[in-house]
Image (cartoon, helix red, strand yellow):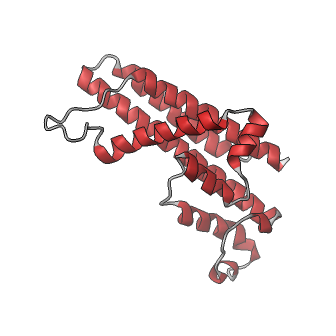
Amino acid sequence: MIFGFAKDGFEKCIADARSLIISASILSINDQNTAIRGSLMLVVGAFDFFIHEVIRVETARRVASDPESVSLQVPLSVTARGQDRLGTEIDLLIRKQNSFRSFVGSANLKDCFSSISINIWPELEKTKGLDIKETRKRLDTIWRWRNRIAHEGDLVPSNSSFTYWSIYSEDAIEAADFLESLAKAITDVLENLAS
């Protein structure tokens, strides 16, 4: 399976996040909430890793078999290194170009798949029967939640006593379950398109 590395890494992070939530139950409430926030960050980071890897693998596969289906500008310096190194060089180029990008969020996900000529949302709806409006809404909610933790410390704005937003382990577990099912659906779509 060509997406094995992406799937295995993602599953490891999801398992670690769930384990963190379970172990947090023995901590004080403040430490427990911090652990839940950390597990959510791990889950969302794992999904971002998964998408990065899937896009890298699929782009490299398409460059080798159908270069016209990929919007990738390969500099002459990369192609000049020779055909025998082209696969490795393309792989490094894709990693470098995407290294600073986040693919979480429904618009970001759509954009990254458009680079390999896939309109992912209609494909997920057609192939997997997902309610795309609801799926995009849930993904964007998780993405905003992650951003609130990452960029605002999960603090309620304009509160001089530095109060955190409420957080519950059930919500983090539900986010993990949702992202896990979305990752599986994306893999199924890509494997279906490749066959």
Relative side of 141 to 50, left or right: left
Residue 13: x %, y % from top left: 50, 36
Residue 26 visible from this viewpoint:
yes
Q: Quadrant of residue 111?
A: bottom right
Residue 1 visible from this viewpoint:
no
Q: Quadrant of residue 84?
A: bottom right
Residue 20: x %, y % from top left: 40, 27
- In the picture, which quadrant includes the N terminus? top right
Residue at image position (54%, 47%) is 49
Relative side of 166 to 40, left or right: left
User: In this orientation, which residue lies closer to the viewer: 14 or 147?
Assistant: 147
Query: Does 193 appear above or below 39?
Result: below
Query: Does 172 appear above or below 46?
Result: above
| Number of residue marks | 0
Farthest residue to the right: give it: 195
Residue 39: x %, y % from top left: 41, 33
Residue at image position (50%, 30%) is 175
User: In this orientation, which residue lies closer to the viewer: 191 or 84?
Assistant: 191
User: In this orientation, which residue lies closer to the viewer: 57 or 156?
Assistant: 156
Farthest residue to the left: give it: 160
Residue at image position (71%, 67%) is 87
Residue 109: x %, y % from top left: 59, 50
User: In this orientation, which residue lies closer to the viewer: 126 or 67?
Assistant: 126
